[in-house]
Amino acid sequence: MTFQTITQIAGLNRMGQPGLDAVRVARAAMGMLIAGFGVAVISSEGAPLVWAAIQHILATPAQLQAVKLSAIAGAATGLGGLALLVMKKIDDNGLGLFIAIAGGMMAAAAVISLFLPAIQTEGALVLALVSAAAGYGVMTILDQTLPHEHPVAGHEMAGAERTRMALLMTIAIALHNVPEGFAVGASMGNINGASGTALSIGMQNIPEGLIVATALWSIGIHKAVAASAALATGLVEPVGAAIGVLVAEAWPMGTPASMAFAAGAMAFVVCNEMIPESIKMTGKIKTIYSAGISTVLTAIALAWMGA
């Protein structure tokens, strides 16, 4: 792959522009240097801390269980990717309904398994409210600053632009899986709550994996490779879970704060991404009823589980 091709994919030299933009290339080069320096520092200074954190989690059953649950939920993106291998045509209506159902499950888990236990913790009401708002706000900022697209790449897009969009969308989905893992890790104090949260996140990860795999397939990547990439986007969730369990343990009020923060982040994903995407795919009425019924049934199941 030539330098010019790389810059076209990154958006630094779009098709039809006369030559490279020197300022944008200089900014990209500076960004790469800073990123390289950061990787070097983390590798030399942060690696021992990371290894110590991993050993601590492995020696703590509750924390290890939360990370395992998150890994299972993250691996569900691979199921969506595998669906691409057996499907000849993607039905937007069916995919939209699935997203709506998963969104309802995620909303119920965010409220019942995370937010309510957080505000019911003694002395944590104000902290939980602020943390939930912070979680929603952080996801809003990330959504506005990270370049990404929600729809699957269409055939009408030019080659380099379509490739850029598909890659950016894949990266964005992988990044927003981190707070989902954080949600499972933050709820480690209530194993039923962690299980319910992991189940709902895993359900909504299946259509996400299908979307990622389809987007990559649409730019010429082999189906098997696209399915593997979809699985990889979900495997960042255990990282988020590890962060969640460590924050909850290190700070006396870390558990309610982390749970509320994760609930806010999950609320953003449901309200800003899942429901709007489902409406575009399958219509407002079907989305509202599917998500509503899913929310109620999930709430009943979580209450029965004692989450």
Image (cartoon, helix red, strand yellow):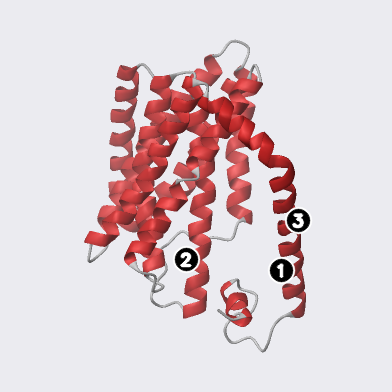
Q: For the residues marked 2 and 3, what is the alpha-carbon distance in whole angstroms?
A: 28 Å
Residue 135 percent location from the top left of the image: 59, 36
Tell me which amino acid carries mark 2. Answer: Ala
Whether residue 283 is visible here, answered yes or no, is no
**Is label 2 in a helix, a strand or a loop?**
helix
Horizontal and vertical percent position of residue 34: 76, 58
Q: Which mark is residue 28?
A: 1
> Answer yes or no: do the residues labelled 2 and 3 have beta carbons within 8 Å?
no
Q: Position of residue 223 (x, y in %)?
A: 33, 65
Q: Mark on residue 280?
A: none
Which mark sits nearer the N-terminus, 1 or 2?
1
Amino acid under label 1? Ala
Percent position (x, y) of residue 279?
A: 36, 53
Please give the label number shown on residue 166.
Answer: 2
The secondary structure type at the circle numbered 3 is: helix
Q: Which mark is residue 37?
A: 3
